[in-house]
Image (cartoon, helix red, strand yellow):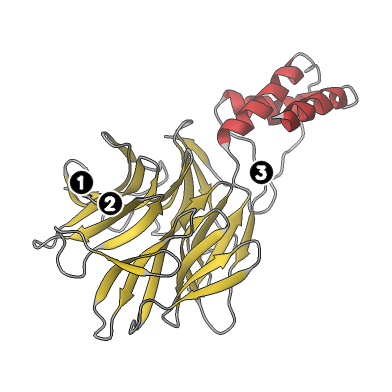
Amino acid sequence: MKNVFEFLIVMTASLKFIENRKTLFFVFFLPIFFGISPCYSQVYTTLTEPGTALFVNGISGNEVVGTSDNGNGFVYDINTQQYTTLTGPSGALAVQANGISGSGNVVGIYYDSGFNPHAFLYNGSTYSTLSDPLAAAGSTTPNGISGSSIAGYYTDSNNADHGFLYNGSTYTVLDVPSSQATHAYGVSGNLVVGDYVDNSGNKYGFLYNGSTYTILNDPLAATGSQAGTHAYSISGSNVAGYYTDGNNIDHGFVYNINTQQYVTYDDPLGTEGTDLYGIAGGNAVGIYTDSSGNPESFLLSGIPEPESLQMIFGGIGLLVLGAVVQRKRRRLSRSRGCSGNVFDG
């Protein structure tokens, strides 16, 4: 907070020497007035490991989890840039790591020698089996973990999908009202995010707070069985996922619960689509598809917190407002990788 006030003081002093005050007004104040956060540069970094392809699924703090095409799961440390391989319990043929908690616990699925799937919780030394009592054999799929809470979904004996929230002892069914399928993917505290299919076959995201389901529907998303909005992860007030447009192209998004804004994030190399699967603070992970149709995992850094931006730049805008006397206009440009669209929900 101290840095914020120092920044405001410096900017206020600098304004006395800036001729084009009106440009500053349009940059800092008007976007806030209309509920649009200023454009910040983001950095997209492709994640690679020699000899294998990576498919990221989640992130917590500085740790990223996913699966490689050699059949092993992995944990990637952003700070050290080191990969830790997850091979599963003895006899496992393959491991799919889906989510990781702040304490380093990992959830996912491993396949035994008969290639039968088993849900697991890995605490760094031991693999514990997870199985929703209502699930058909092998259908429990844990996707996200926060503390002792695990979110996922299962398929019942009638081949219908249901979300679940597991607290370490009890499985709670999560079904969005009037849905034919519900999938839970991310959890943070008492908040759960995921997607569902309504009775018309349309797909939407949802946010569940323990009592109420809020529908998440990116304004740019198309409707239909092959389109829709999918919420995969939550961190603080930000929900990350992707939507599919009318051209069947995926776009990553971050939705802020407090401002109810959707911001699109497209990797510049993802000409055929960008999906976000995890978010933690200012970082997110996902997969883009390049012009040749190849999927690549990436780390996105520099996602702003909307509340902080509005406080800082809103304050600057108010300071500048009284000094706007020029009519000079200048075309504004955006830095590469900056968010393309901001929309109210």
Residue that badge 1 annotates: 175
Residue that badge 3 annotates: 40
Q: Amino acid at mark 1?
A: Asp
Residue 134 lies left or right of residue 46; in this view the side is: left
Q: Quadrant of residue 29?
A: top right
Comes first in the chain, label 2 or label 1: 2
As rendered, which of 337 and 89 lies closer to the eye? 89
Q: Position of residue 242 (x, y in %)?
A: 42, 53
**Foreground mark, 2 or 1?**
2
Q: Residues within 10 Å of mark 1 (few under 14, many from 20)?
A: some
As rendered, which of 278 and 78 lies closer to the eye? 78
Q: Residues within 10 Å of mark 3 (few under 14, many from 20)?
A: some
Residue at 91% over, 25% down: 17
Residue 339 lies left or right of residue 140; in this view the side is: right
**Number of marks drawn:** 3
Task: Give the CA separation, mark 3 to mark 2.
Answer: 37 Å
Task: Check if mark 3's residue and mark 1's residue have beta carbons within 8 Å.
Answer: no
Q: Amino acid at mark 2?
A: Tyr
